[in-house]
Each structure stands twice: as C-alpha cells, then as structure tokens.
Image: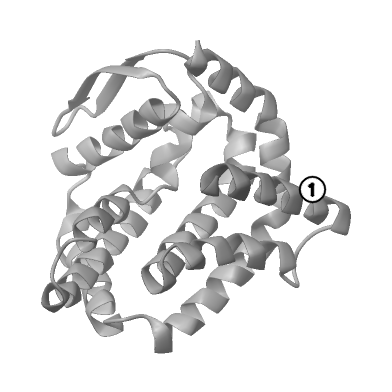
Amino acid sequence: MLHRKIGRSLNVLKPLVGLVSLLYTPAAAEGLWHTTVQLTTNLPYLWFFLAGCGGYLLLWAALLRRFSITWFSTFEHELTHALFALLTFNKVTALKATLRKGGHIEYEGTAHWLIHCGPYFFPTLNVLLLIPMAFVPDEALPWMYAGQGLAMGYHLVSTYHETHRNQKDLQLAGYVFCVAFLPFANLLSLSILLNGLEHGWPGIESVFVNLVNADLKPDPLIAACWHQLNGWVHTVVTG
C-alpha cells in the first residue's frame, strides 16, 4: 500500500535527511535572516503581524507560562501529528486531547519520523489561517495578518515549550536525528511561511533557490545534489 511505501522510503532516507539538514542549517539561518530583514519594508501590514506576534509573546510571559499545559496546545500538537499521518496516506482513527494528561492519535498505517517530528517544526495554525486569507475582502486582511502574527507567537512558544528530552515523539524519532533535523526544519519552515505571506508561491520557491545559493552552503557537490532534488520537486508540484 502507498502509506507503506512512503513510510519505508522516509525511514530509509532518514540518515541522509539528517546529514543534509545538519549541513544546511547555517544556510537556512542565513536565509531566514535575509527574509526577516526584507520583511521590515516589504511585508504588507507588517505592524499588524508584529502586533499579533508580540501580543502573544507578552501574554505568554505575563500569564500563560504559569500553566504547564492546556487543552488547546495539546489538541494542536496532536492535530499536527494527524496531519502528517494523513499526508503520508495513513488512516487516522482517533485523536484525543486532555487538559492535564496529554493526548495522542491513533492511525492505521506506517509510522515514520515525519509524523513524530511534525509538531516540533510545522506552524499548523499559520497554515490553516492561509485558507480564509484567500477569500476575505481586502479590508479584513490587516486583521488576518494580525492573526498570522498571533499564530506565529504561539508556534514559537509551543515549540520551545514542547521540545525536550522527555518527549516520547523525539525518543521515537531518535535524539541524534532530531538534533540534526529540527533546527534546520524550523528555520526553513519559518522562511517558507514568511516568504509565502510576502510573495505567495514564488516566494516559497525562492526559499529553496536561496538555500542552494547561500554563502554558508556546504560542499558544492552536496549543493548540486540538493539543487537536483529541488528541481525534481518543482517538476512534480508544477506538473
């Protein structure tokens, strides 16, 4: 079945993914820095975005950090697991979130590291907010950008709060792999989101182009392999 082929392929590629992620983390950091600098002049409704992000960070510092866990953060965490399970053609049969006792999902299919690691780098709320942003009238866009900022603040805090050695997800994925993969994945996902908000799909493509051409990229041979992989992905996505 398709989920088995995808799961096995991901697990076979896991060492390569970890190595490439580790080597490209400096280039991803460079790309996110350039993106952040460009956003100060180019992102529409920048101040609404910053107000939403800063507002959540202040709210967390003043109040929310006193609570060790909430139902919503658990639900969002498990929802992200479920999303990656579905994207790799597994069948999700249950999703449970509690206030104090954590949560879990159940699915029929093939387990792999992408399902385990998904909540620790993927900004689920930001991605979900992109759906209504495509349909709301122009006068509502400033508030949608404020919502994106709020979701970004939540993602940064929840990722920081949830990433620790006692997480079973990280144990299942493997600590060594997580140390290599997650910094790169977080830097890349933030760059993709911010460039997508600024430029749409062309902005997302530019993230991968800039990653290959970054001053801090690793050995040219690895860069060439990455470039070929990026070209293949672009061909598959665009048809």
Depth check, front residue: 42 or 239: 239
Colouring scheme applied when the structure was drawn: one colour
Residue 58 appears in the picture as rendered: no
Please name the amino acid that badge 1 sits on: Cys
Report the number of discs. 1
Q: Badge 1, how many Cα within 10 Å: few under 14, some, many 20+? A: few
Residue 136: quarter of image:
bottom left
Q: Dividing the image into 4 quarters, which one contains the C terminus? A: top right
* Side of 184 where 52 appears, left or right: left
Residue 133: quarter of image:
bottom left
Which residue appears farthest toward the front when viewing the image?
A: 239
Q: Give residue 35's position: percent from left, percent from top.
A: 51, 75
Depth check, front residue: 16 or 235: 235
Residue 77 appears in the picture as rendered: yes
Rendered residue at 19%/24% (across/down): 96
**Residue 119, placed above or below residue 34:** above
Q: Give residue 31's position: percent from left, percent from top.
A: 59, 69
Q: Give residue 238's position: percent from left, percent from top.
A: 53, 49
**Mark 1 sits on what residue?**
225
**Residue 187, placed above or below residue 73:** below
* Side of 210 where 75 appears, left or right: left
Depth check, front residue: 51 or 189: 189
Rendered residue at 18%/77% (across/down): 142
Depth check, front residue: 67 or 233: 233
Q: Give residue 156's position: percent from left, percent from top.
A: 36, 58
* Side of 18 where 42 appears, left or right: left
* Side of 187 where 152 appears, left or right: left
Rendered residue at 17%/57% (across/down): 64
**Residue 28, placed above or below residue 78:** below
Q: Secondary structure at mark 1?
A: helix
